[in-house]
Image: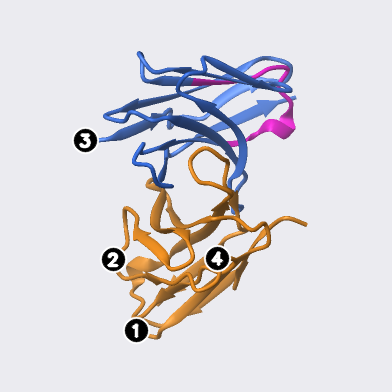
């Protein structure tokens, strides 16, 4: 089944403890992206990647890192999480970007205490 | 500044009627506009994409229009059903050549039997 898989689904962590949210797609898509979704603010793009080793900042990149060492994987790294990073996170992928629809993962609900 | 505006108030309609949702944008010149459906706590699901040189696109009970002069897209669901109840998001590319989709905050649609 074509899908984007995120893990974990839920995560509660403490301030400052490094964490990684994994994202993997099995559709051989070039483009991948991370979004966070907050009430009243909608979906905001954190980082995106156009291909292996090619990444760029989205609208809210502060406090996040990404890497794209393989085409299928695009992990999101929070080096020192803070409470304002408590959010619902989505990974998405697309065959060729803006002229194709994106497939989203099921989301990761992160709580930083 | 760039804005994507969708009605923040929920749209309530009766089963069988046509639902019409609006997406207005300012200070964008998108080459593509996309519509997604999102159910609570789940990732958005791609529905339709329309290009700037297309006036209208249809898929089953869905119809999207794109007026680049008015800077507006309309999303129609004909013969609506309670199962169509969800939040609908529009998304634009930034026309930068890269995959930078920006989302509106969405409009909730409630279809009552």
User: Can marks 2 and 1 be said to lie on one chain?
Assistant: yes
Please name the residue shown 50% across and 71% down the image.
Answer: A75
Q: CA distance from mark 4 to mark 2?
A: 18 Å
Q: CA distance from mark 2 to mark 3?
A: 21 Å
Name the disc covering residue A62, or none: 2
| Crowd band around label 2 with a 10 angstrom C-alpha radius: few (<14), some (14–19), many (20+) | few
Residue A24 vs B85, above or below: the answer is below
User: Can marks 4 and 3 be said to lie on one chain?
Assistant: no
The answer to which of marks 4 and 2 sits earlier in the sequence is 2
Please name the residue shown 35% across and 13% down the image.
Answer: B69
Q: CA distance from mark 1 to mark 3?
A: 34 Å
Q: Quadrant of the N terminus of chain B?
A: top left
Give the secondary structure at mark 1.
loop
Magenta part of the chain: B74-87
User: Can marks 4 and 2 be said to lie on one chain?
Assistant: yes
Please name the residue shown 73% across and 34% down the image.
Answer: B83
**What percent of the width, then of the height, locates residue A76?**
46, 70
For chain A, the rendered hue is orange
For chain B, the rendered hue is blue
Give the secondary structure at mark 3.
loop
Q: Are marks 1 and 3 in contact (CB under 8 Å)?
A: no
Position of A49 with respect to B20 (left or right) is left
Q: Are marks 2 and 1 in contact (CB under 8 Å)?
A: no
**What percent of the width, then of the height, locates residue A78?**
39, 76
Q: CA distance from mark 4 to mark 1?
A: 18 Å
The answer to which of marks 2 and 1 sits earlier in the sequence is 1
Mark 3 lies on residue: B1
Any magenta on residue A93? no
Mark 1 lies on residue: A16
Residue A70 vs B112, above or below: the answer is below
């Amino acid at each position: 089944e074509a899908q984007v898989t995120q893990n974990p689904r839920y995560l509660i962590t403490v301030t400052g403890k490094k964490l990684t949210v994994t994202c993997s797609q099995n559709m051989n898509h070039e483009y991948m992206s991370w979004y966070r979704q907050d009430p009243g603010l909608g979906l905001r793009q954190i980082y995106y990647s156009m291909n292996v080793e090619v990444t760029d900042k989205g609208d809210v990149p502060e406090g996040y890192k990404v890497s794209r060492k393989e085409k299928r994987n695009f992990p999101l790294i929070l080096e020192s999480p803070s409470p304002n990073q408590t959010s619902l996170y989505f990974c998405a992928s697309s065959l060729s970007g803006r002229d194709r629809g994106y497939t989203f993962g099921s989301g990761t609900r992160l709580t930083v205490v | 500044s760039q804005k994507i505006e969708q009605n923040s108030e929920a749209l309530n309609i009766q089963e069988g009627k046509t639902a019409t949702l609006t997406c207005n944008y300012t200070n964008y010149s998108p080459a593509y506009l996309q519509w997604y459906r999102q159910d609570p706590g789940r990732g958005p699901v791609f529905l339709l994409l329309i290009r700037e040189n297309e006036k209208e696109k249809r898929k089953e009970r869905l119809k999207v229009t794109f007026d680049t002069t008015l800077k507006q897209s309309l999303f129609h669901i004909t013969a609506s059903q309670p199962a169509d109840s969800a939040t609908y998001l529009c998304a634009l590319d930034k026309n930068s050549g890269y995959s930078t989709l920006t989302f509106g905050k969405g409009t909730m649609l409630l279809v009552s039997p």
